[in-house]
Amino acid sequence: MTAVNDRRPTDPAGQPDRSSRIADLVSAARQGSDDALGQIVTELSPLMWHVARAAGLSSDDAQDVVQTVWMSLLSHLDDIHTPGALAGWLATTTRREAWRVRDAGRRQVPADQDWLAELPDRAPGSEELAIIGDGRRALWSAVGQLSPRCQELLRIVAFAPRPDYQAVAAELGMPVGSIGPTRGRCLAKLRALLAANPEGSPR
Amino acid sequence: MTPTDAGGFAAADEPLDDLDLALLDGIRDLYQAVDPMPAELPERIRFSLALRGLEIEVARLTAEEDLPVLATRAVEQSRTVTFDSDSLTIMIRIDLNMDGTARVDGWLAPSQRREIEMRTTADTLSVVSDEQGRFAFTSVPRGIVQLVVQPTERGPGGRGQSVVTPALVV
């Protein structure tokens, strides 16, 4: 991680602090702090939620999978020492569980619910444009033009603590760059799409 | 295309820059807006993690079905849920009592006599299944609950694994 830290650009969102805070929490949780474990749950559950949803699970299934993975973590907590390893383990285990649930297809859909409304957003679409601000629409539409694999990667990486998204992406078999924190193909493609329509640049 | 600014041409093998990080922030904001994690999920997770320290075998939720039943005054939902672990299948049926509590009837397979706890946000209820693996919690406060099937051997040194379900809302 040191090499990554050294090359990390300035980050106004304070993400590097997030990673070192999680490192402290992991250490406290291993020593038995329930409060620290609870804070790790708050920090990393959104990452797992988006892994599960990007894998195509319904909201109910995604919630069950995220919870089950946290329960499985209890037996592995002593083997996981860095925030990067933790985020990577949680993301890969969530994706494996999500695939298992999706492929089994055993969950029955309640007859009285509009289950179409439960379908996850596999790809950004026009309906979502109505609830996001004008400034983000070009970004959303550019994301929607990426390959499904790039959409999944960027969705997951965006929720991983920095600088650990490198580790998370690599764990998922989707390395952002082979050496150091490089941009990677998906972000390069996104930037090319936005350059063709520069209104989407968040600056 | 002609590059108009730093976003114009960006090679995949260059280091991440501020614009990349800003784009990732933007993507995070977008997905948070269109598909947010349910706000109550972390509370359910923290409830189910209170069992740390036990040797646990996780029972996954593998099937769930809502059965509409006509109650006296209203159509109430009855629900069956199945959990599978390596050693045990736990099936439960959840019905609502007239007094606002829930009734949970369950069945263990393979059938066996086991001590079963139901953790609730108030306190922990305890029953023992019969030889056919059947058990019942007749009055469960509604809210988050979790089933814990106690190990078969409980002596010192012979402690086995508890089979634990995810937390669910009854």
Image (tube, coloured by chain):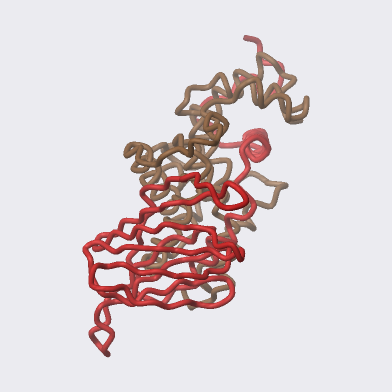
Q: Residue at x 53, y 22 (%)?
A: A146
Judge whether A61 appears above or below A131 on screen: below
Going by the image, does B79 lie left or right of B97? left
Camera sees residue B14: yes
Q: Residue at x 43, y 65 (%)?
A: A81
Q: Which chain is brown?
A: A
In this orientation, which residue lies closer to the viewer: A196 or B160? Answer: B160
Judge whether A194 appears above or below A78 on screen: above
Q: Residue furthest front?
A: B72
In this orientation, which residue lies closer to the viewer: B88 or B7? Answer: B88
Asked where in the image residue A19 lies, by quadrant, the reply is bottom right
Q: Residue furthest bottom?
A: B156
Going by the image, does A178 lie left or right of B73? left
Camera sees residue A24: no
Judge whether A110 appears above or below A26 on screen: above
In this orientation, which residue lies closer to the viewer: B130 or B47? Answer: B130
Judge whether B12 appears above or below A41 on screen: above
Q: Residue at x 53, y 71 (%)?
A: B120
Q: At which x and y percent is residue B85?
A: 30, 59
Q: At which x and y percent is residue B141?
A: 57, 68
Which quarter of the rendered picture does the N terminus of chain B lie within? top right
Q: At which x and y percent is residue A155?
A: 55, 36
Q: Residue at x 33, y 36 (%)?
A: A103
Q: Colour of chain B?
A: red
Q: At which x and y percent is residue A16?
A: 62, 54
